[in-house]
Image (cartoon, helix red, strand yellow):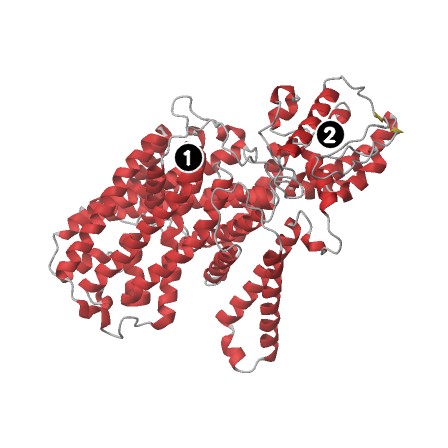
Amino acid sequence: MNWLRDVGRAVRRKKHVSSTQQPSILVRCLSTADLSFVGIGCMLGSGVYILTGEVAAEMAGPAAIISFLIAGIVALFSALCYTECATRFPETGASYLYAYVSLGELIGFLIGWNAIIIRILAVSFVSRGWSAYFDNVIGARVLNFTMDVLLDGAEWEVPLVSSYPDILAGVVSLSATVLVALGTELSAKTGRVFVLINIATVLMVIAVAFVYADYSHLVKHGGFAPMGYGGIIKGAAAGFAGYSGFEAIAFAAEEAKDPKKGLPISVGLSFVTAILVYMGGAFAITVLADWQNINAASPFVSAFEAVDAKWMSIVIAVGALCSMTGGLIACAYCFARAIFVMGRDGLIPAIFARTSTTSHTPTVATMFGGIISVIASIFVNFVALIEFLSLMIFVEFVIVAMACILMRYNPTRDHCGKERNIEHVVQEQKQRQTCNKELSGEINNDMTYQSDNDQHSTSSSTDVQAPRFASEEITPAEMDKRRPTVTAIIEGHEQSCEYNKDLPAESEVNNHDVANGRSCNRFSASINNESIGELTPLLGSLPPTSSQILCQSEKKPGRLLWSSDNPVKTVLSSLLVFIVSTIVIVWIVSYKMEEIRGDNDVLTFILMVAAMLAVTGCVPLFMLKQYTDEIPFKVPLMPFIPLLSIVSNIILMMRFEPLTWIELGVWTAIGLVVYFVYGIRHSKEAGILPITPNRYTQASKTYS
């Protein structure tokens, strides 16, 4: 069963990321304005010209304005979670990175696996929309040519395959991919131009709408909200998809000039702009025409035709094409970074992490994703995949909200979570120097721990004496027997180790540690008293660090078990209880309310138990200490907002058909195969703590 235990440790290992801005092969060239336009371009895309009509004509009527406002606020909850994580870890990867750091390698891989296909298919989907819109403007000449010349008038009838090959969509997708591969700064500036044209178009639409407005349309046929509260919420659920592009800003964290300031500002600007644009667009079409007469496929054109302002159709066409082009560039940028970061971490072949020496962009990842998007643009029928993509986005948002909560309750400075003063730093500096002397051979490098008659004192503020080293001679044969157990203990506790690239006296640190960005006492700073007890019979007593001594001196009797200094497991358990309970509640409320009204005692009891568990699961989150030191941006009202984000996304997820969940399961199963065949063996995190016969002494002392 050792192999099963090893697999269990592997899927739970976490990525070690520095919270400080680190040098990168990618160029930090994106200003706050660039980040804002990336987010706006991805959030608007084709949504403002299509989604507004669908919500107004089929779901909420004139109350579509309220639907988009609600959807924007709910989406902002998720965006705040992304922003805290992105400013805390200013690297590319977004949801994949945050899941990897907080929930482990397997969850991180699956989220990254989903993120790649979401962005690739998003490029293909928008390319199809671009092609259809352009072809409609020129009188369907591209479609007629394709049908007459390539297909002899016969459409394809194959499941999941388009009725005809959309060559124009493939060309558009390829063009966006090539532009992103040529350089981040170039693609950002180009995208900015298209986004500005789009915003100017929407402003012109709103201004002209005021001229032709008939405000009586807002209260005809059932009033302002003809579908009632249910219609508004249904419209908000559909409108939520229009705001889902904000995560593009998180993907750009590693190329932002000042991510800690630029990311929060750009998220705020993007959301304000997107909410105003969506609400303005919904207002314009509902004051120009009766909501029952709006054409959901081309709402702006049909609305202006109703007031004999057909000349606006040209303006709308230009704005729509520019909006979709900006969205294409942003989505292509995202899938390139999603592929690149997984290749860099070794979970997919490392060739995808190669970058161009001239453009400093991940060209291999970009072109690989681009080729897939081109093929999908030409051949795939997206009608059957829209809900599949939406479901994966909602799952991603739930995981990021969980990651945000977990990282807020996870100590980041030292084992006790106490902010270190200068005396603590000096103490740790001395320990590292001792460790470096051992590694350089200045201290006898054998497996004997001599008794230390000198007292190992801590800072003056603690006045606590450290334990002495135990004397025990361990033979090589005995060490071979003990090594698997020692390795198991070390690897089991390494997940909570602090990743620290700001090493003092860096020139003295062993090359192996510098290369991996860890200090000598990284392991000892994270190991707790229980694990020391496990290691003592095997290696003798290990020298304590200042953080351990401080922890022991500050322990208070009677503290509850779940309020330990490293409460990650407790918080994760609480979140799982809360999520499962919320799923049960939402499912019963959504599909079984009629039975509850019919006095179904069993369902009523289940609903009450689920509600009690949901509330109980939240209790530790309000009682445990939050660690907020050096977090540039903090989600306000923690943990309320992330929990609201989780609940909102679960509510939206419950509306999908069983077939959509089956599609997600199939794609996840394919990802599991890829991970266990390749990723688990090639992960860069697998080499974080090498324990081999020749290096055992060095490793054990390095992390002591």
Q: Residues within 10 Å of mark 2 (few under 14, many from 20)?
A: some
Q: Residues within 10 Å of mark 1 (few under 14, many from 20)?
A: some
Q: Which mark is residue 691?
A: 2
Residue at figure coordinates x 57%, y 40% from the top left? 674
Residues 63 and 452: in front is: 452
Q: Distance between the Cα atoms at labels 1 and 2?
A: 39 Å
Return the residue at label 1.
258
82 w.r.t. 507: above or below: below
Quarter of the view holding residue 425? top right
Amino acid marked by disc 2: Ile
SS type, badge 1? loop
Between discs 1 and 2, the one toward the N terminus: 1
Residues 165 and 671: in front is: 671
Q: Is residue 113 visible?
A: no
Residues 494 and 127: in front is: 494
- Left or right? Give the position of 553 relative to 257: right
Give percent across and percent down for residue 297.
26, 57
Looking at the rendered image, the disc whose residue lies closer to the viewer, 1 or 2, is: 1
Amino acid marked by disc 1: Asp
Residue at figure coordinates x 51%, y 39% from the top left? 89
Give percent across and percent down for residue 379.
37, 44
Residues 630 and 166: in front is: 630
Instruction: State the quadrant of the C terminus.
Output: top right
Quarter of the view holding residue 671? top right
Give percent across and percent down for residue 412.
60, 41
Give percent across and percent down for residue 489.
75, 39
Quarter of the view holding residue 528? top right
Q: Which mark is residue 476?
A: none
